[in-house]
Image (cartoon, grey):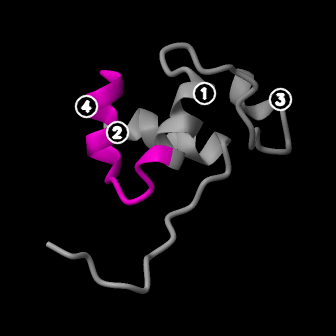
Amino acid sequence: MRWNRRITPCTTHNKPATKIDMEALAQDVATYPDDYQYERAQRFGVSAQGIRHALKRLRVSRKKNTSASQS
């Protein structure tokens, strides 16, 4: 069986993003830093899980704002 030939686990996926333009996502993060992932997913037409993986590829983490919103 294929799964028992390799002793070490495969930890990385060497596959490029196919649906999400990474430059456009980086620009979107810079423009809307406080948006939720499901809001970004609606703008890009992909799933929230896909946005999560793309943000992980860009090494973007969620940073909380210390000031309250003015709404």
Specify the quadrant of the image occupied by residue 65: bottom left
Instruction: Name the residue type under label 4.
Output: Gln
Marker disc for residue 22: 1
Q: Nearer the viewer, residue 19 or 4?
A: 19
**Mark 1 and mark 3: Cα distance apart in space:** 35 Å
| Location of residue 26 by image quarter | top right
| Residue carrying label 2 | 40
Q: Secondary structure at mark 4?
A: helix
Q: CA distance from mark 3 to mark 4?
A: 41 Å
Q: Furthest-top residue in view?
A: 18
Q: Amino acid at mark 1?
A: Met
Cα gap from disc 4 to disc 2, whole angstroms: 5 Å
Which corner quadrant of the image does residue 57 belong to?
A: top right
| Distance between the alpha carbons at the discs numbered 1 and 2 | 12 Å
Tag 1 secondary structure: helix
Residue 9 lies left or right of residue 36; in this view the side is right
* Front disc: 3 or 2: 2
Highlighted magenta segment, given as a residue range: 31-47
Location of residue 19 in the rendering, given as x and y in whole percent from the top left corner = 48, 15
Q: Which residue is mark 4?
A: 42
User: Which comes before the other along the chain, label 1 or label 3?
Assistant: 3
Residue that label 3 marks: 5
Does any portion of residue 46 appear in the rendered image? no
Residue found 31% across the figure and 53% down from its top:
36
